[in-house]
Amino acid sequence: MSCVIIEDLQVAAEYTRKCCEKSGLLDVKEHFTNVADALAYLNTTTVDILFLDVEMPGATGFDLLDQLGYSPKVILTTSKPEYAYNAFEYHVIDFLKKPYTYQRFLEALQKAAVKDDNDSQVTSSDKHIFIKSDGKLVRLNNEDILYIESMGDYVKFVTADKKYITHNTIKALEEKVDKTCFMKVHRSYIINLTKIDDIRENDLFIKGTEIPMSKAHKQDVLRRLNII
Amino acid sequence: MSNQAEHKTFIFNEKINKELLISLYEDDFLYMEEIFSITLTQLKPDIIHLNSSFEAGDLSALQKAVHKIKPSFGFVGLPETQESCKQFEDTCAAASSIEQVASAYSALSNLLKESVIIIESEHGKFKEYNLS
């Protein structure tokens, strides 16, 4: 993840930079000591996370958030706990009171990662979804998706001609996909009900791929099919 | 063997909160040296600005100046100085004239001088320790 540090106290900025490097998860793109310079950069460059001080010369961190054209994840770094309420109002990820420990820094990163999973891996409408794959957002029409398969911390979206791997879980996706055409049939599979070719015992087949059905889900699947 | 172990034991100044420093930097004494060095470099002009804000009778600038230097002391294991800065910041916020904060400022100014002396001393000890 890319990040920018906006902090007028040099020692605090260096400490944050060191925490970022130590985590191995963050690439510190820039450090700014005032809001004006940070805004000039951020209006032309998108980053994932801002480590943002509040009181700085000229304008405050909250002024920056008011003027920024997009919403990166924000972790406030300040020595004034009185800003906690404002932090809440601005939907910041976390509030680090200086000086904070590396462990506390990691907890803030963890919160950022959870938010990422919750709101940006998959966005859906009735007819299509968007997934993050290979660094871009890819639109997949519901009617093109055959099934979704679990791969540990990742899932594979399978269409007739392509496979897309993205960071997500079957459990999280189950809540996000259109339930009128998608259904979980096994802890590792969500299938498109309209794509089932045939069912044999505890397996169903889609375009030649055998997909297991758990006992718990089999009856639900059968109920959803137009069996005459 | 025992001499070497003794040689590698760092004795912190009693005013320094050793536990806080270890929680921030573990036992990385090179890192501590770097942090103390950066702090000293920035504190000196910041304290000059603090003094000039007081002498100019600019309460708002004084409040901002003390707010800025406040966390520096936490990073070098002087949380009590950080807390004193916070109390002075609050005093400034509640005051309507520079005269109302003069006595508190005098006390803070003395504390800051003492704190800088401690930071300088510890920085020197870190340098020596890291060279040995």
Image: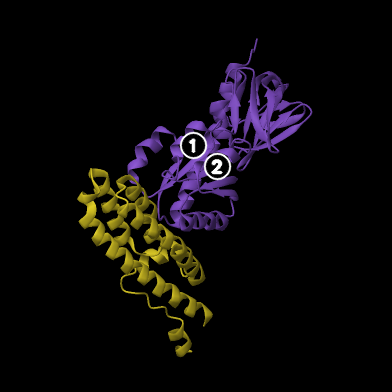
What's the chain of the residue with tag 2? A
User: Where is B66 relative to A127, above or below?
Assistant: below
**What's the residue at 42%, 80% (across, down)?**
B9
Q: Is residue B20 visible?
A: yes
Q: Earlier in the sequence, mark 1 or mark 2?
A: 2
Q: Quick check: marks 1 and 2 in contact, CB under 8 Å? A: yes
**Does label 2 lie on the same chain as label 1?**
yes
Q: Position of residue A155 (x, y in %)?
A: 64, 37
Q: Which residue is the extreme one toward the front?
A: B56
Q: Secondary structure at mark 2?
A: helix
Q: Which residue is mark 2?
A: A38
Quadrant (top left, top right, bottom left, bottom right) of the N terminus of chain A: top right
* Front residue of this view, candidates A106 and A56: A56
User: Where is B39 relative to A165, above or below?
Assistant: below
Image quadrant assignment for residue B26: bottom left
A14 with respect to A87 (left or right): right
User: Where is A122 relative to B49, above or below?
Assistant: above
Q: Is residue A114 visible?
A: no
Q: Amino acid at mark 1?
A: Leu
Q: Residues within 10 Å of mark 2 (few under 14, many from 20)?
A: many
Find chain B in the image and tell me its colour: yellow
Question: So how many labels did they put on this image?
Answer: 2
Which of the numbered marks, if any, corresponds to residue B6? none
